[in-house]
Structure formats: C-alpha cells, structure tokens
Amino acid sequence: MIEIKIYKTKTEKSPFIIWRDNLDSKARGVVRTRLERVRLGNFGDVKSLKDGVYELRIDFGSGYRIYFGKQGRSIIILLVGGDKRSQKRDIEKAKEYWQNCKDKNE
C-alpha cells in the first residue's frame, strides 16, 4: 500500500488542497477515486518529468493533472494539481515545491 502525503509550503498552505477544493463535487470525486487507486498501487497514466517530479494524468474534464514526488518505494507527496491549460506553470511550481521538500528532509 502507498502512503500519500500532502506538501505544505513554509506558510503551511497546501497548493494541492487549494486546487482540489476549488473543483466541483464531481471532479473532486474523480480525483478522490483516482488517488484511492494510487494508494492501492495502481498508478495508471503517469509520466515521469524532470527533477523527480511525476505527472498523474486524469482523463476527465479539462484534463486534470496531479504532480507528485516519491520518497522511497511506498510514499508519495502530492505537490500541486491543475489541468492541461495550466500545465507548464504547474510543472514549474511542482519542481520548485519538490526541491523545497527535498531540502527540508536533508
């Protein structure tokens, strides 16, 4: 089983939670279901990006994406979410958040 953690900024805000909470209820349900599959080890459509960041793609709505990093084999850290339109900006933010996360754990 995969443990899912949520990244928080220095000001204790979670970009992923902020994004998720702004989705409509149907989209939140789709995201929740997809993360439950990840928790069980079924990652599905995932793309490895640079610098240790991964993109979990959800074929729903405007093409939702969840960006995460891995700690070991059984822990992932959710960094930020977005959609196809905000993909470039979201990837840059995810890389920044992941670097902050790694720096904090060193």
Image: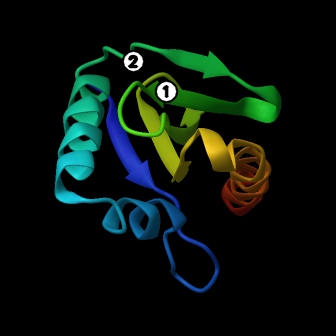
Q: The residue tagged with tag 1: helix, strand or loop?
A: strand
Q: Residue 43 location in percent, x, y?
A: 39, 18
Residues at discs 1 and 2 in contact (Cβ within 8 Å): no
> On the picture, is 97 further left or further right than 96?
left
For the C terminus, give its image quadrant. bottom right
Q: Is residue 6 above or below residue 83?
A: below
Name the residue beneath numbered marker 2.
Answer: 43
Q: Residue at x 36, y 43 (%)?
A: 4
Q: Residue at x 54, y 49 (%)?
A: 82
Label 1: few (<14), some (14–19) or many (≥20) C-alpha neighbours in 10 Å:
many
The answer to which of marks 1 and 2 sits earlier in the sequence is 2
Residue 83 versus residue 33: which sits nearer the camera?
Answer: 83
Name the residue beneath numbered marker 1.
Answer: 57
> On the picture, is 91 further left or further right than 76?
right
> On the picture, is 43 further left or further right than 15?
left
Mark 1 residue type: Arg
Residue 41, image quadrant: top left
Q: Residue 100 location in percent, x, y?
A: 74, 60
Q: The residue tagged with tag 2: helix, strand or loop?
A: loop
Q: Residue at x 53, y 69 (%)?
A: 8
Mark 2 residue type: Phe
Q: Residue 51 location in percent, x, y?
A: 81, 33
Q: Residue 105 location in percent, x, y?
A: 66, 56
Label 2: few (<14), some (14–19) or many (≥20) C-alpha neighbours in 10 Å:
some
Residue 95 versus residue 74: which sits nearer the camera?
Answer: 95
Q: Is residue 38 above or below residue 5?
A: above
